[in-house]
Image (spheres, coloured by chain):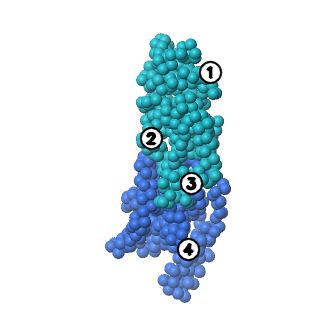
Chain colours: A cyan, B blue
Amino acid sequence: MNPLSFVIYLDGTSAARRAVSYLAPLAAHAHVQITLLVEEANADQAEDLFQAAETLLNAANPLLKTANPPIRSVRGATPERAIVLEARAGQPNLMVFGPLRKEGWQRWLGQSAVRSLARRLTTSMLLMTGRPNELRRALLCTAGGEEVLGDAEMTSALLGPLRGQATILHIVSQMPLMFNQDQRSEESLIEAVLGDQSAVSRNIEAARQMLVRHGIAAKLRVRVGLVVEQIQEELRGGGYDLLVIGAHRARTPLDRVLLEDISAELLRDSPIPVLLVQNSTSG
Amino acid sequence: MLSGSPVASIALSFLDSGVIDALQTFTMITGSRLGASFIVLVIGFIYYLRGRQRAASISIGILSLSVTATTYLPALAIGYWLIQGGVLDNVRLSLPTAVFDFVETFFDPLVAWVLAHTNNLIVFVLGVGVLLLAFNLLDRALPQVDAEHNAFGRVGGLIYRPMAMFFLGAFVTSLTLSVSVSLSILVPLSARGFIRRENTLPYIMGANITTFIDTLIASLLIKNSAGFTVVLAEIISIAIVSLVILLFFYRPYERLILRLLDRVVNDTPILITFMVIMVVTPVLLLLVF
C-alpha cells in the first residue's frame, strides 16, 4: 500500500479526541504515519495533549509504540496558522481537525476558520464533526467529473485497510430529456447515468472499480433534485460515517465569483465527518 | 401575439392616446409579460401533445411562468406606489431629436395617408401588424447561439451562484430583448441534461428585467413622459422584488418553485388544472373588472 500520512490537530476539545479515536484503527497499519499537532499558544498543555492522544491510539493499537509511534509537532501562533504551516512543512496526505472558530473581531463577522482553511490548504482535509461510531461507511458525492478519481483514491486510502464500504452518490437535475415519471426508479436512473457512455458514466465507473480494487464494497446511488438537499437527505437515512466531497473547483478568480461553493455548505451543515479532497484540478 | 413586447408597445400607445391611464398601462404591461411566459408554456405543451417528452417540453414553460408570476405580482404593489406617489416623475430621459425628426419625416405622412383612406380600426390592426413584423425581423437579425458548443456548454455540469445566473440572464436578454429567445438558448441544454434546473430560476429573473429595454425605448419614442415613468416603474419594481428574493429568500423560494414544477410536470390532472387556471384567471379578471 502507498504510504499514508496525516496530521491530527489537538486543541483539547472533544472533537479532537474523537478524531484520534476515529482514525486510531488506521494507525495499526505500517504504511500509516500519524503526526499530532499542537499550536504554540497551547505549548504549556502540549505534553498533556500529546499523551492523551497517544493513550487513545495505543489503546486501539498496543503495538503502536514500537512499530510506528506518532510524531509530535508544535508550531503556529493560531490554530489556522499551525495547520497551514504543518501542511506546508510535512506535505501530509490529510489534515484532520475539529470545528475551529475565528478569534477576535473576525469571529463577529461570522467568518469560518474551516472555510478559510478549505481555500488555503493544498492538501486534503478531514473536518471532525458529529459523533461517528467508527470509520466504516463512506458517502462519496460526485458530479461525475474526473476529480471523482482523486476522491476515490483518498477514500480507498482511508477505508481500504479497514475493509469498509462506500456509496458513490450522483445527483441528477430534473431536466434531462429522458426524464419521465416511469423512469424515476433508482434502477432506471442508474442505468440512465451509467448506460450512456458519457464522460460522467466512465468516471463514476472508474471510481467504483478503484474502490473495489482496494477491497471496498462499492455501490452507486443516483438521486434527483437539488444537490445539497439530496446529499443531506441521503446522510439522514444512510447510516454513513464519512462524507467525501471534492474541494470547490474555482480555477480562476472569475470562477470564485460565478460558481456556487457547495463544499462550504456541506462543511458547515454535515452531521458526520467530512473529507474534503483537494485534487490537482481544484482551485 | 406570442410575445409581450408588442402588447407592451400597444399599452404605451393607448396611454399616449389617453385611452388608459398610467396605472392601467402598468398593469397591462405586467399582464403582457405573464402572457408571454404563458405562451412559452403553451408551446411546450403543444410539443408534448406532438409526442415530445413532457418534462423537457413543459418544464421551462412552467418555470418561466412560475418565476414571472411570483416576481411580477408582488412588484405590482411597488409599482403602484411608485406611480401613484409620483416618485419617478422627475426622472427623465430623452432620445436625440434627430430620432424624432426621422420618425416624423418618414412615418407621419404614411400614417396620415392611411388614416385618410381607412378608419381607426384598420389603422390599429395595421399598427399591430407592423409591430409584430418589426419584432419578427429583430428576432431574425439576432445571431443564432449554438448553445451546446460555446461557453454555455460549460454551464451544464456546474452550479452557478444565483446572482451570477441572474446577471447572465439579464445580459443575454439585453441582447436578445426577448425572454423567450433567451430561454430558448437554455432549452436544448436543459433538455439534454447539460444545465441544471437550479441555474435557470435566477436566469429567468434577470431576463424578466432587461426584457423591458425595447419597451423603454418605445416609451421614449412616443414622447409621453408618463410612458417612460411607467416602464421605469416596471423595471425598478421587478428588480427590487427579484433582488430581495435573491438576497434573502432564495433557498426557500428555489425549493418552492422546483417542487411546484415537479408536481405539475409529473401529474397530468395537476398539469391540466395549472393550465386551466392560467387561462381562466385573466379572462375572469377581464370580465369582473
Q: Nearer the viewer, mark 4 or mark 2?
A: 2
Which residue is labeled 4 in the image?
B131
Q: Tell me residue B272's x, y (percent).
A: 41, 68
Residue in the foreground of this view, choosing between A244 and B1: A244
Q: Chain of mark 3?
A: A
- Give me the residue at 40% from left, 64% from top: B270
Q: Is residue B146 left or right of residue A105?
A: right
- Give me the residue at 55% from left, 59% from top: A178
Q: CA distance from mark 3 to mark 1?
A: 46 Å
Residue in the foreground of this view, choosing between B100 and B15: B15
Q: Is residue B118 left or right of residue A209?
A: left
Q: Nearer the viewer, mark 3 or mark 1?
A: 3
Amino acid type of the residue tagged 2 in the rendering: Gly
Which residue is labeled 1 in the image?
A89
Give the secondary structure at mark 3. helix
Q: CA distance from mark 2 to mark 3?
A: 23 Å
Which residue is labeled 3 in the image?
A192
